[in-house]
């Protein structure tokens, strides 16, 4: 078990966290674009 005195602020490697977050943002962006495209398509080609 690590002691509280062993922790050095700012020394944690967060590169994997940054990569995951960047992937989340990229996925969210493309999902939004896809949904927006579907909505435009449906608005243009809707049938009654």
Image (cartoon, rainbow, N blue to C red):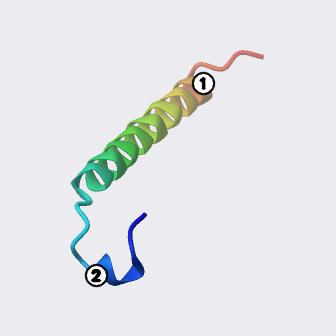
Residue 35 location (% of width, % of height): 52, 33
Residue designated by label 2: 9
Q: Could you give the CA–CA distance between mark 1 and mark 2, rounded to whole angstroms?
A: 52 Å
Say whether disc 1 or disc 2 marks the residue closer to the N-terminus: 2
Residue at the location (71% across, 15% down)?
A: 47
**33 w.r.t. 17: above or below:** above
Residue that sits furthest to the right in the current view: 48
Q: Nearer the viewer, residue 8 or 18?
A: 8
Residue that sits furthest to the top in the current view: 47
Tell me the quadrant of the picture where the N terminus can be found.
Answer: bottom left
Judged left or right of residue 47, residue 8 is: left
**31 w.r.t. 7: above or below:** above
Numbered disc 2: secondary structure: loop
Numbered circle sitting on residue 33 = none
Residue designated by label 1: 42
Residue at the location (39% across, 38% down)?
A: 27
**Quadrant of residue 6 within the rendered picture:** bottom left
Residue 19 location (% of width, % of height): 26, 48
- Which mark's residue is nearer the viewer, 1 or 2? 2
Residue 7 location (% of width, % of height): 31, 77
**7 w.r.t. 29: above or below:** below
**28 w.r.t. 7: above or below:** above
């Amino acid at each position: 078990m690590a002691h509280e005195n062993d922790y050095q602020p700012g020394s944690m490697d967060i590169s994997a966290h940054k990569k995951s977050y960047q992937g989340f943002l990229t996925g969210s962006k493309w999902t939004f674009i896809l949904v927006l495209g579907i909505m435009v398509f449906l608005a243009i080609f809707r049938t009654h």
